[in-house]
Image (tube, rainbow, N blue to C red):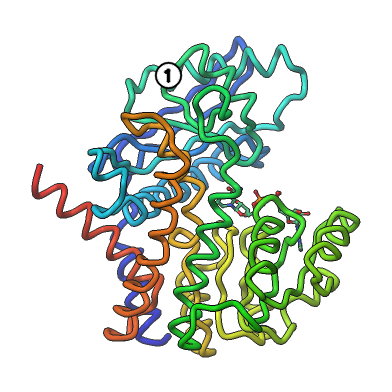
Amino acid sequence: MTDFGKTLVEYLESRQAFERMVILNDERTGLEASVVIHDTTLGPALGGTRWYPFATRTEALIDNQRLARDMTYKLALAVGEDTELAQAAVSFGGGKAVIRGQPTQDKDKRKEQLRAYAALINGLAGRFVTSVDVGTSVEDMITMKEVTKWVAGLPKEMGGSGDPSPATAHGIAWGMRACLEAVFDTDSFRGKTVAIQGIAGKVGSILARDLARQGAILIGSGGLNQSAAQKIAAEVGAKLVPPDEIYEQQCDVFAACALGGTLNDDTIPKLRCRITAGGANNQLWEPTRHAAMLQDRGILHAPAFWINAGGVINVAHELHPDGYSQERAFADVKRIYDRGRTIIDISRKEKVLPYAVAIRLAEDRIRKARRAA
Ligand code: NAD
């Protein structure tokens, strides 16, 4: 393993603890849920609720812990001291919740289960604030709001921040600019080729429109809904390729905006890009090894928890003391660019993977806050 990889292993192996875990097995509604609060040094833990049919309880809990830890890093990095949020004395720790099972489409049963789950969140007395994630919707947050105030991700009509995807895509574009500057000495997309995996998705499609407006040449791939992919590709003038062929496209930036784990042993050797920077959470199948593998291939990899933080930054702004303001929220989303420059500069100076630098910066902030407390 390279020195880059070793440094990362040391970081990850020494930091697996979490503050609190609460499990609910509600016989009345049949709900099985867990909340993991990873770290609240910087503030209440913020994190989405994932409703997913994990095969086993262990699988659900392991994923819950990993996702909660990622939220700690994401928020510690994103809501730095220079942000609008921090200036209003608002900052967040990391947590995540998982409801295990197939989300029911029976509206009444769903509401009943969500109310039971919201009561569990109430029991945490503000230490955990949740919002939308895979399997949950804005409507679910509205239902939960009847029971608990510790819910964000509400519609704009209710004073909320609405769909987080535009902010996520906006942040990715800013993060990509930091990467372009580091690799090509320009922050312009003009004439740069970007391959977007998941071009028809909520994040992928907004990103594609934004980059097309800025002069990027686009290649895209879609999932099961190929007609949606064809439609957006035609709109932005992208070349659409079959899902398996997206990796080998000659491009400047490969943007994974579909599922997690698509950067792995099979796909990394195929890549013909200089940068990987996309929205998908957990893009690296094995973070340690695959971040190093990309580095060894001369590819600059933007850690997901840095570059896709726009959505959670936007949601976090619902908890600003003066209420949600898109202007303030997007000013903080833009800071993803500044974080990127810092991460990449340190990475180059110290010859440490950007992934490890991002974790270290987040941990340094938490440690500093702990000492000051
Ligand atoms: P989405 O479900 O709207 O989009 C995903 C798209 O990928 C879909 O169009 C799907 O058809 C497509 N897809 C699935 N398998 C594919 C494959 N093998 N090849 C190409 N396309 C494939 O989800 P989204 O909200 O756009 O999120 C995309 C990713 O970004 C997810 O990993 C999500 O966890 C992450 N993310 C999203 C947000 C957000 O604000 N929406 C925030 C942070 C992270």
In this image, 160 relative to 10: left or right?
right
Question: Residue 347: x, y in percent?
Answer: 33, 80
- Quadrant into which the N terminus falls: bottom left
Q: Residue at x 82, y 62 (%)?
A: 235
Q: Which residue is drawn at 60% across and 9% down?
A: 28
**Mark 1 — residue?**
149
Picture quadrant where residue 355 is located: bottom left
Question: Residue 207: x, y in percent?
Answer: 64, 61
In this image, 23 relative to 3: left or right?
right
The image shows a total of numbered marks equal to 1
In this image, 125 relative to 119: left or right?
left
**In the foreground, 334 or 263:** 334
Eyeballing the image, is 156 above or below 143? Answer: below
Where ligand 1 lies, by quadrant? bottom right
Q: Label 1 CB, ligand 1: below 8 Å? A: no
Q: Residue at x 31, y 70 (%)?
A: 10
Eyeballing the image, is 46 above or below 23? Answer: below
**In the foreground, 141 or 295:** 141
Seen as rendered, the residue at the extreme left is 372
Eyeballing the image, is 303 above or below 158? Answer: below
Element at label 1: loop
Picture quadrant where residue 141 is located: top right
